[in-house]
Image (cartoon, grey):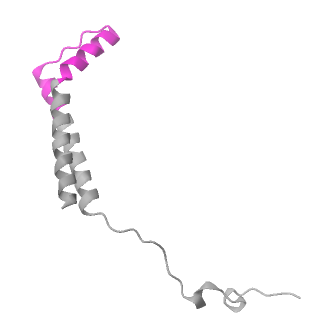
Amino acid sequence: MTKKIIFWTSIVVLIIVNILIDTNVNNYIEILNKCFNKEIALTNFYYAIICLIIAFITVLFIVVIRLVIFYKKEEIKGIKLKSEDRYISVQQTGLVIMK
């Protein structure tokens, strides 16, 4: 249940952020014009391409969130060794002990 709540709230937040970014593209272009003293013309075609790229990035975020939330597996805590496996004998290693 909590996984679905996290997933749907993240989708709503990402859509709201996407809409806010799309509506402010013209403001970003004006800031770039002032910073570089250039006149950047933003036609409807370029505006649509920018919005599509932002929407594609948002979809990728949604896919990643879905994969992380729904397909997260438990981590392996460690390997439990048997008591006889903890110590390696000299015969198993092939070492020669010199006295």
Judge whether residue 53 can be spotted in this image: no
> Total number of numbered labels?
0
The quadrant of the image that shows the N terminus is: bottom left
Say whether residue 82 is left or right of residue 66.
right
Q: Which residue is drawn at the image coordinates 19% and 45% (left, top)?
A: 59
Residue 93 falls in which quadrant of the image? bottom right
- For the record, the magenta segment spans 24-52
Say whether residue 28 is left or right of residue 98.
left
Residue, far top: 37
Judge whether residue 63 can be spotted in this image: yes
The quadrant of the image that shows the C terminus is: bottom right
Compared to residue 98, the image places residue 53 above or below, namely above
Residue 67 falls in which quadrant of the image? bottom left
Residues 75 and 50: in front is 75
Q: Which residue is drawn at the image coordinates 39% and 68% (left, top)?
A: 75
SS assignment for the magenta stretch, majority: helix
Q: Is residue 44 magenta?
A: yes
The image shows residue 61 at horizontal and vertical percentages of 24, 46
Compared to residue 67, the image places residue 83 above or below, namely below
Q: Is residue 25 magenta?
A: yes
Compared to residue 48, the image places residue 59 above or below, namely below
The image shows residue 79 at horizontal and vertical percentages of 49, 78
Q: Which residue is drawn at the image coordinates 69% and 89% (left, top)?
A: 89
Residues 31 and 10: in front is 10
Q: Which residue is drawn at the image coordinates 21% and 41% (left, top)?
A: 58
The image shows residue 43 at horizontal and vertical percentages of 13, 19
Say whether residue 85 is left or right of residue 15.
right
Residues 23 and 43: in front is 23
Residue 15 falls in which quadrant of the image? top left
Compared to residue 72, the image places residue 22 above or below, namely above
The image shows residue 94 at horizontal and vertical percentages of 71, 87
Residue, far right: 99
